[in-house]
Image: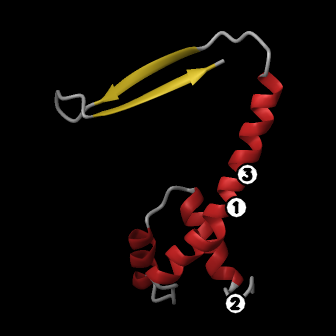
Amino acid sequence: NVGRQPLGNLLLAAAILICGGVFKKFSDVFSLLNIAFMSEVTFYRCQDVIMLPVIMAAWLREKKRVFNLLKNKMLILCGDGRCDSPGYSAKYGTYNDGL
């Protein structure tokens, strides 16, 4: 257990979050296999209370480290955009930038 949360629930919720999964799909698969699975409330509580604060803290530390590393240095930035469109409308787009 981590606090009052069973470790299996926490690890499974973390795996779903990190791989970009959706609770409903995982819940349906476990249901089809007749395997007990955490509730949706438990899943989102694990995310809100434990995982997201840890991820945010790690991101802020890494961002600060990179900013300090690059401080007072000349940078050349580049980027590229891409539109993935269903049909012919540019409804979805991504933009990547790099150093």
Q: Which circle marks residue 58 in the picture?
A: 3
**Badge 1: few (under 14), some or many (20 or more) residues near its Cα, within 10 Å?**
few
Q: Determine crowd level at label 3: few under 14, some 14-19, many 20+ residues with C-alpha closer than 10 A.
A: few
**Residue 84 on image: x %, y %:** 31, 31
Of labels 2 and 1, earlier in sequence is: 2
Residue 71 x/y as whole percent: 79, 22
User: Alpha-carbon neighbours of circle 2 within 10 Å: few (<14), some, or many (≥20)?
Assistant: few
- Give the secondary structure at mark 3: helix
Does 7 sit above or below residue 77?
A: below
Q: Position of residue 50 (x, y in %)?
A: 65, 71
The span from disc 3 to disc 1 (Cα, nearest Å) is 6 Å
Residue 24: x, y in percent? 39, 72
Q: Which of the 4 image quarters holds residue 95?
A: top left
Relative to 25, is 3 on the left or the right?
right
Three-letter residue code for mark 1: Val
Q: Do the numbered discs 3 and 2 sit on residues whose CB atoms are within 8 Å?
A: no
